[in-house]
Amino acid sequence: MIFDYLFGLFSNDLAIDLGTANTLIYQKGRGVVCNEPSVVAVQNDGSRGKRRVVAVGSEAKLMLGRTPGSITAIRPMKDGVIADFEMAEEMLRHLIRKVHNRRTLVRPRIIICVPHGITEVEKRAVRESAESAGAREVYLIEEPMAAAIGAGLPITEACGSMILDIGGGTTEIAIISLKGIVYSRSVRVGGDKMDEAIANFVRRRHNVLIGDRTAEQIKIAIGNAFPSNEELHVEVKGRDLLQGIPKAVMVSESEVREALIEPINQIVEVVKIALEKCPPELSSDIIDRGIAMAGGGALLRNLDKLITQQTGILTTVVQDPLSAVVIGSGAVLDQFDVLKDVVIQ
């Protein structure tokens, strides 16, 4: 106990949004101090069967699809949960040390965001990864709750608030009242499925093979969920599947919208189901307050307009959708005595 106390003196407590696409870290007293892609590049030592970490975060993401045989770029998170325990631990350790300026004598208290409804095994994997990475204490908070706090919704009041959090691996919707989740639903559709849909569409329509990073760049540049007044185009470079040589093609905004129909429809369907399941008293609150959208997927242009049209409920994107979850977790860290009821015991 005395050692934990002494280590705590050297450490600033952290809130971590351990996402499929990006990992964000909030440091108590400083705000968001880290936003890195959830990617780890490792060198395979064939003789010993060991993996040595070469790069983490942005540097590792640049290596995706560009590594020689001895180096592999790994995404340790899949669908919002840990897929590679060892690499998740390495990534957390690296980022915690980076935030603490590479000091080794740090044992922070950590709050980690997890998807609603993950299994006990998955919760234990997250806790153990954080403890192995140097955490003194580990608390878990459900992502929809953290996003609602980060979006400034009145979660402590006796009124209903609806939050839609579209991440890289999962989309989660929750109805929250009196610091509790009244209803929540999670589907494994998010930014990654959108990227995959775009890559598949370009392959089918133009016979050009592109990677996930290129598909993501197309989505950011001209992705749109609802027709707009202007028709944007972007040049896409990949490999011609017929001739096997590099090729550039033009892809239009309407083509990307067509590619995204399936994942977007799944997101809209989740919202409709949540509205059907909502208790009557809370339904009136949601009509008055609308639906708040957070997560990187909320940045897809006009997705809020499409959901408003399909549901009849005003849908708005929160002020900082990418950071809403980690900011909400940080608020719990800052006001732990007031908000400790929202963490998973």
Image: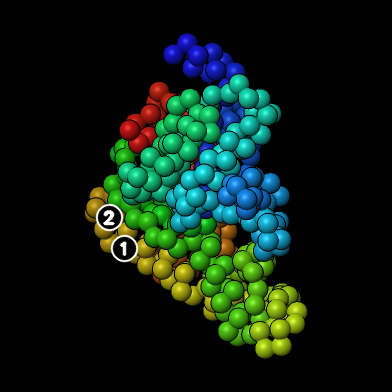
- Label 2 Cα crowd, 10 Å radius (few <14 / some 14-19 / many 20+): some
Tag count:
2
Label annotation for residue 173: none
Comparing 225 with 48, the one in front is 48
Residue at the spot x=53%, y=29% of the render? 134
**Image height check: is 262 above or below 95?**
below
Comparing 7 with 196, the one in front is 7
> Closer to the N terminus: mark 2 or mark 1?
1
Comparing 212 with 76, the one in front is 76
Cα–Cα gap, marks 2 and 1? 9 Å
**Image height check: is 202 above or below 216?**
below
Could you tell me which secondary element the residue under label 2 belongs to?
loop
Residue 161 in percent (x, y) is at 37, 47
**Could you tell me which quadrant the N terminus lies in?**
top left
Pointer 1 residue: 273
Residue 8 in percent (x, y) is at 53, 18
Residue 97 in percent (x, y) is at 63, 32
Give the label, 2 or 1, closer to the camera.
Answer: 1
Could you tell me which secondary element the residue under label 1 belongs to?
helix
**Image height check: is 302 above or below 83?**
below
Instruction: Look at label 1 and name its amino acid.
Output: Ile
Whether residue 189 is visible, yes or no, is yes
Residue 60 in percent (x, y) is at 67, 51
| Quarter occupied by residue 180 | top left
Pointer 2 residue: 278
Instruction: Look at label 2 and name its amino acid.
Output: Cys
Along the horizontal axis of the image, is 223 left or right of 173? right
- Label 1 Cα crowd, 10 Å radius (few <14 / some 14-19 / many 20+): few
Residue at the spot x=56%, y=77% of the render? 200
Residue at the spot x=50%, y=29% of the render? 135
**Image height check: is 328 above or below 278?**
above
